[in-house]
């Protein structure tokens, strides 16, 4: 009897401990899932709109006419009016075998190629350095920073002027492998680099593109994540996040909601990159679907209804639809818009508004557009995130043409210079196309570019110490419109432009100003552009002009005269980018350190979420034990 009286409390105590730990484990799991849901789906508080970088009155006032104007519009395939490119030179002999052969190249570079395989960080670095060494007149290699684990974020410039900015010619970019387990885009960038440099001498369209554009390619924004991702994994999150467990496409400043997540080294590097180089056009390459997605990715509301949300329309919705269609219509499968598998959405013509697909906070394409005036489209290249390498030849054949055609869209719309009465360039002049609230600004050479579809527009231009101006102009299909704008000094006065209504965003002072009513009682000069036939040559060249003397152009306007003001005031060395380039003359094969092993902290969401859940669970366990 005594034994039974002693054992009963023990059994009871054991049951209590077991129950306590079971309850604690359940609570920990629920807390973890709750934190994950809050961060990834809802997770952001409404921002105090005093910190907005643009001139929106508020996100609630969202262009009620824009959606109606854009509905039902089908845009033509671009660049038909440029001289038709020749059949693209094959950059690779496609091999459908399990282990495809390396790409073939011209006889002059028969030992230079890129295999259809997945290149780890060391192999990627080796290929980029080899390319820079082999093609020093067409490529330049630099790093915009390092990942959490210290890997370089390499960028390859491919252009006829790789080391120096070409006055009057746009910079464009591709960013791939932002999610480490979405690997197809990473490999497509290596093949694109190879294709461009080996086709320059033989393909007139590629020559035109590189002669008139500087193409910056970041093959891997998340090299740490790629190192732990695994080939053949179509779904799942291993490698998606950076080494600290952050989704980089939720880590940028957001217009609609405050993004509370800690800025990561990779996103900080990209933010600094786009603040130093003014990009006109950008593409972000992803995987897991087959669609071209355009801004906005987020909405003013907090509701989340995956695959069935209303579109969040930008002021440039027509342009973004056109850019997305440029890619999808040149892709043999994407334009069909078919779902990848049962239960996933289909997309009309292979394009979608990002928020209509599913809203997200802190995305890169919204950041590029809102903070920097750069048009970016997200391109989902494959239904499987990390397919077998044997499928890479097929993906390259499908994406080669749209990758090239998309970049050429930087030459559509309007471009030009803003200068003072003495012909000196005005840096950081703020520009807005009327009725399109997202602004952009001039470079230190007074240059500007804006992608626009054919139509009539009014450009508002203002800068400190100058009277603001409005200039009417037209855009046609065949070529970009060249527009030179002269600002008149306001007798040393400041404040002739509209006052900014909002505080600048903490990341950087926005180059444009908010508010409306530019020119209301402010001495705005309105100038009508001369006939477009006298403005530009064809194929994007500035060519010969016979513009009447005045505000736009002036006299005979040859390419040499056009650039005279900006080139004489700046030495050639000032055109060099603000990054240290890899020296191709010092190239030698590099012995890289072994590939880093999988690290537990690389697991998705490890430190911030699970740590909070475990800490809470431990407190609950202590509470139950005390009871």
Image (cartoon, rainbow, N blue to C red):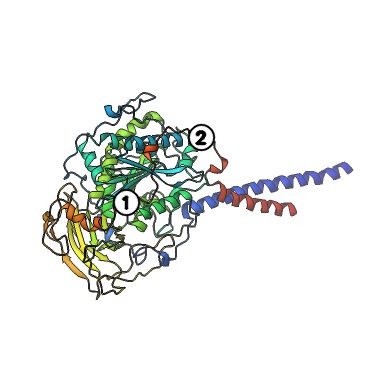
State the residue lying farthest toward the top. 97
Q: Quadrant of the N terminus?
A: top right
Q: Whole-Å distance between the Cαs marked 2 and 1?
A: 38 Å
Q: Secondary structure at mark 2?
A: loop
x and y percentages locating residue 516 in the rendered image:
29, 69
Q: Nearer the viewer, mark 2 or mark 1?
A: 1
x and y percentages locating residue 44 in the rendered image:
47, 58
The one nearer the camera, 422 or 114, is 422
State the residue lying farthest toward the right. 2
Image-quadrant location for residue 513: bottom left
Q: Is residue 542 visible?
A: yes
Q: Which residue is mark 1?
A: 573
Number of the label disc, if any, that sits on residue 450: none
The one nearer the camera, 227 or 555, is 555
| Residue positioned 24% across, 44% down in the render | 211
Number of the label disc, if any, that sits on residue 595: 2
Is residue 574 rendered to the left or right of residue 228?
left
x and y percentages locating residue 305 in the rendered image:
42, 52
């Amino acid at each position: 009897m005594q034994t039974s009286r002693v054992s009963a409390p023990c059994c009871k105590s054991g049951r209590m401990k077991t129950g306590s730990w079971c309850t604690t484990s359940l609570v920990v799991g629920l807390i973890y899932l709750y934190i994950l849901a809050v961060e990834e789906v809802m997770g952001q508080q409404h921002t105090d709109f005093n910190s907005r970088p643009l001139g929106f009155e508020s996100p609630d006032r969202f262009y009620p006419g824009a959606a109606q104007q854009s509905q039902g519009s089908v845009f033509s395939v671009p660049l038909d009016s440029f001289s038709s490119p020749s059949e693209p030179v094959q950059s690779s002999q496609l091999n459908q075998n399990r282990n495809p052969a390396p790409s073939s190249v011209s006889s002059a570079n028969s030992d230079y190629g890129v295999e259809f395989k997945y290149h780890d960080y060391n192999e990627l670095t080796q290929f980029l350095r080899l390319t820079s060494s082999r093609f020093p007149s067409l490529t330049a290699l630099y790093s915009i920073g390092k990942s959490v684990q210290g890997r370089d974020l390499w960028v390859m410039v491919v252009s006829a002027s790789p080391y120096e900015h070409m006055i009057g010619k746009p910079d464009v970019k591709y960013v791939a492998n932002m999610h480490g387990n979405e690997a197809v885009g990473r490999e497509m960038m290596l093949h694109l680099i190879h294709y461009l440099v080996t086709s320059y001498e033989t393909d007139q369209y590629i020559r035109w593109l590189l002669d008139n554009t500087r193409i910056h390619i970041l093959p891997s924004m998340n090299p740490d994540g790629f190192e732990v991702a695994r080939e053949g994994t179509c779904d799942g999150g291993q490698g998606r996040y950076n080494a600290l467990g952050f989704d980089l496409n939720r880590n940028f400043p957001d217009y609609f909601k405050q993004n509370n997540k800690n800025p990561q080294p990779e996103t900080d590097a990209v933010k600094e990159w786009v603040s130093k180089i003014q990009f006109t056009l950008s593409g972000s390459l992803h995987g897991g679907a087959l669609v071209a997605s355009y801004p906005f990715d987020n909405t003013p509301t907090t509701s989340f209804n995956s695959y069935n949300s209303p579109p969040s329309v930008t002021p440039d919705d027509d342009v973004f639809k056109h850019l997305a269609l440029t890619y999808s219509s040149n892709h043999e499968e994407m334009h069909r818009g078919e779902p990848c598998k049962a239960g996933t959405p289909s997309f009309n013509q292979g394009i979608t508004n990002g928020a209509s697909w599913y809203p997200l906070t802190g995305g890169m394409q919204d950041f590029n557009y809102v903070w920097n005036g750069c048009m970016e489209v997200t391109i989902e290249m494959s239904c499987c995130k990390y397919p077998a390498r044997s499928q890479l030849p097929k993906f390259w054949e499908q994406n080669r043409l749209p990758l090239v055609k998309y970049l050429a869209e930087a030459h559509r719309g309007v471009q030009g210079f803003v200068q003072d009465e003495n012909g000196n360039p005005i840096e950081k002049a703020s520009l807005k196309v009327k009725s399109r609230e997202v602004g952009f600004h001039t470079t230190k050479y007074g240059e500007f570019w804006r992608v626009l579809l054919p139509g009539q527009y009014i450009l508002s231009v203002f800068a400190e110490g100058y009277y603001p101006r409005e200039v009417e102009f037209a855009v046609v299909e065949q070529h970009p419109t060249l527009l030179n704008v002269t600002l008149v000094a306001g007798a040393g006065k400041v404040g002739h432009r509209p006052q900014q209504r909002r505080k600048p965003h903490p990341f950087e002072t926005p180059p444009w100003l908010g508010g409306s009513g530019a020119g209301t009682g402010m001495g705005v000069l309105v100038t009508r552009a001369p006939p477009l036939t006298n403005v530009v040559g064809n194929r994007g060249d500035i060519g010969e002009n016979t513009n009447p003397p005045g505000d736009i152009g002036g006299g005979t306007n040859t390419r040499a005269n056009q650039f005279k003001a900006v080139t004489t005031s700046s030495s050639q060395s000032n055109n060099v980018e603000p990054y240290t380039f890899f020296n191709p003359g010092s190239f030698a094969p590099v012995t890289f350190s072994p590939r880093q092993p999988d690290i537990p902290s690389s697991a998705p969401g490890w430190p911030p979420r699970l740590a909070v859940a475990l800490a809470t669970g431990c407190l609950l366990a202590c509470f139950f034990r005390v009871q």
